[in-house]
Image (tube, rainbow, N blue to C red):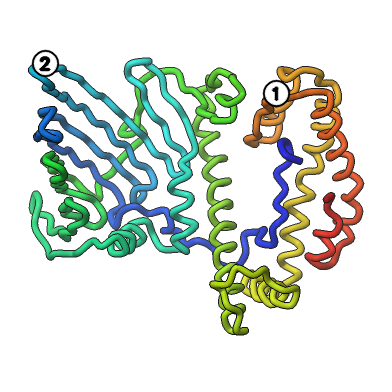
Amino acid sequence: MKKILKISLVLTVGIGLSQLHANSMKRYDIKSGKIEYALSEDGNIMGVAKVKSVGKKRVIFDNYGIKNLEEEVKVKKETTMGKTTTNKRHTLRYMNNAIIYNVDFKQKRIERMRNEGAAMAAMFGGGSNLKESGEAMMKGMGGKKLGTDKVLGYTCDVWELMGSKQCIYKGVPLRVVTNIMGMKSTEVATKAEFDIALNKDDFKLPDYPVYDFNMDRMMAGKEPKPLDKSRLEEMDRRDNAQAKVEAQEGAEAMKGLAAGVAALAKAGVDLKSSKDLTPEQEKIMQDAMIKAMGGQDKMVGKMKKEILENVVQIEFAQKCFGSANTLSDVNKCVDKGNEMFNDDREYYTSWTPKDKQEELQEIEDFKKAVPCIKAAKTMIEVKQCLPK
């Protein structure tokens, strides 16, 4: 089902053996901190525009950067052909693990969204923290570690990469100097405190209404959804827990895929070839993946659980969709499903009689497959049960 169901048909379903370490989302090697920065920018862009800006920035983080607030105020003057314009920019961004709050001071509103970048970093990091992943990435991009220096008395590692020099203390940049195409930008810490006690007030946001930033709603032409601010903490806990499971599943999938590829290489398969795998080669890869992820029984149990958890949602969808005759009606079903099942579902952009017929037929096909799925003993049997 293209919308209401979230059924994973791949073999890599489940949390699996390789749980992400507790530090997998760490940004820094320090538990908490408050840093203030002075910002400046000066230069001439392509000999056409002269730019000069000054500003300040503050960063507050806790739990090794899993909670991170950044606020920046910058005044920028740009002169082109004798005409000078002045712009003031004020931004505030608060990251609470897998959730991001972006403050729009002009519109006096806050947008809440998923922090997909951190989840992907945790997944591909394979259990390493983000600081370690970041250093590996800098090396991979040609970055060089030049030595050490001191900022505010803290000894930091100096990295050079693509016209930028950064002095990084335990993952925290204390000085960044960039010189690219005639523009020099600096960001230098003027005050820093680490391993300090913090509370909720340190991460307090302006008293603006909070909206759910959902791309599916926007694509469906629906206005952002205002949120009940009294429920934000509860929503963050729920969504962070879900993001952790997703990252664990992703990391386990990567582990299984790596094992499968290694098994093919060992069997002498030319991985650079564009030829499709033979059934025998597919079995080699699948067996290696299943073994790496805990064995057949464990994977079958995870896969069946993932699929069968959708049964209650299917019953709701069949009833609600059956009575939906317009695009507005069916998207009301999606909204109600979000509230009932604490899930994010895609909004429909079309709901013709044919769309409705096809969707209801897919729901019916899935319901008929449920007894077969419950009785399945192997992953192949589970896949054979599923509607084509």
Q: Give the image location of residue 114, x and y in percent.
A: 49, 38
Residue kind at label 2, given as amino acid type: Lys
Q: How many marks?
A: 2
Q: Is residue 331 above or below residue 5?
A: above
Residue 264: percent from left, percent from top = 61, 78
Q: Secondary structure at mark 1?
A: helix
Q: Position of residue 328 (x, y in %)?
A: 71, 17
> What's the residue at 36%, 26% (across, down)?
205
Kindly report which numbered mark, 1 or 2, lies closer to the viewer in this rendering: 2
Image position of 276 with respect to 382: above or below: below
Identify which residue is drawn at 44% across, 26% down: 111
Please give the residue where the numbered disc 1 appears in the rendered image: 331
Q: Nearer the viewer, residue 388 or 106?
A: 388
Name the residue beneath numbered marker 2: 83
Numbered mark located on residue 130 in the image: none
Q: Is residue 67 left or right of residue 41?
A: right
Give neighbour class at mark 2: few <14, some 14-19, many 20+ (Cα, 10 Å): few
Q: Quadrant of the N terminus?
A: top right
Q: Residue at x 32, y 19 (%)?
A: 105
Separation of disc 1 and disc 2 at Cα?
A: 50 Å
Q: Is residue 208 above or below residue 46?
A: above
361 or 128, nearer to the observer = 361
Q: Which amino acid type corresponds to the residue marked 1 in the rendered image? A: Asn
